[in-house]
Image (cartoon, coloured by chain):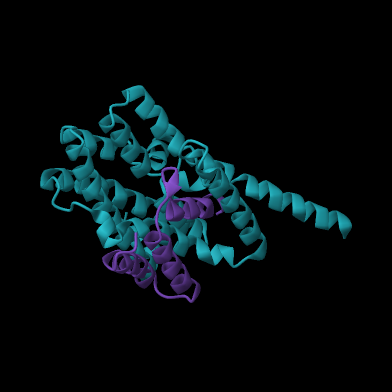
Amino acid sequence: MVLLTALVCTTALLEAHEWAGTARPAGVLVGGVMAWRKAPFLVVVLGAAGSTALLRLLGVP
Amino acid sequence: MCSIWRTLQRGTLRDIALVCLAVGVIGLSYGAVAVAGGLPLWVPVLLGLLVAAASSEFLFVGVIAAGGSPIAAVLAGLLVNARHLPFGLALPDVLGHGRRRILGTHLMNDETVVFALAQPDLPRKRAAYWLCGLGILACWPVGALLGGLAGTVIEDTDALGLDAMFPAVILALVLPALRDGETRSAALAGSALALATAPFLPVGLPVLLGLSGLVLAVGRKRETEVIR
């Protein structure tokens, strides 16, 4: 669990050695909030991808 | 095999199917990236089948495409997935015995481990692990093949937000365990350490270092016990 949580943080926030932009962490955060509120798994994952895509569409890196 | 279907709940089956599908889509981009990097089509497909570890393969293809030596590419690929060592120690019973164990170990990846850990008992852990593993083993190389054939049709999977999918999947699956205070503080300490060291260390090591969050938490627990 500890390893996997660390994995979530690094993959959500970083790309190689650099900051991965704002859109990805924001999307993962949306998914995290949904999951915390016990939304179905499908909704969580699509919500995360969807909000990241939406943010990128709006020009957020 | 039919016992797998009976053992798992429908919700879990749907979740596993979704993850396999997502892996297939990432496989598409992986195949496309590899072919665009100048590798022949059979390389990503064969790697997908034999290595079956997405991050290692992406890194391998990336290092080769950037002109690095194959040995450096293999070492980087091994390092990035060194976390599978403690994963294996956490799930010995799920993997099976004898020859089955070899295949079981091959199926190990972040998704299968997390699905197995999320199940309440051993038969269900085993069923989830094997179903998810076999599904991914099928979807990943097929995705890579289609992606390679399609070349650069999906030019930028980032535009679809697919890169946010992977952390979200793992997060959704570890969250129930994080409702427990002790686990949460260990996980947060480990994550903070991994993030702090990530800019300086080779990819893969920071996550492993995160394990020491566990040591911190256990140490603190002992202290409180002594005080009591």
Q: Quadrant of the C terminus of chain A?
A: bottom left
- Image hue for chain B: cyan
- The total number of labels drawn is 0
Q: Nearer the viewer, residue B18 or B121?
A: B18
Identified at 13% across, 52% down, the residue is B153
Q: Report x, y in % for residue B189.
A: 63, 53
Q: Please tell me which residue is depicted at 62% across the width and 61% down the height of the picture.
A: B184
* The N terminus of chain A, quarter of image: bottom right
Q: Position of residue B160 (x, y in %)?
A: 26, 61
Q: Is residue B126 visible?
A: no
Please state the horizontal and vertical placement of residue B31, each as a whole percent of the image: 21, 43
Residue B204 visible in this rendered orientation of the protein: yes
Q: Quadrant of residue B67?
A: top left
Horizontally, residue B32 falls left or right of residue B73, namely left
Tell me which residue sits at (16%, 32%) in the image. B40
User: With A11 as the anchor, is B13 left or right in this view?
Assistant: left
Q: Which chain is purple?
A: A
Asked whether B208 or B52 is in front, the reply is B208
Residue depicted at 54% across the width and 49% down the height = B195
Q: A33 above or below B200? A: below
Decide which of A51, B173 is in the foreground and name it.
A51
Left or right: where B128 falls relative to B218:
left
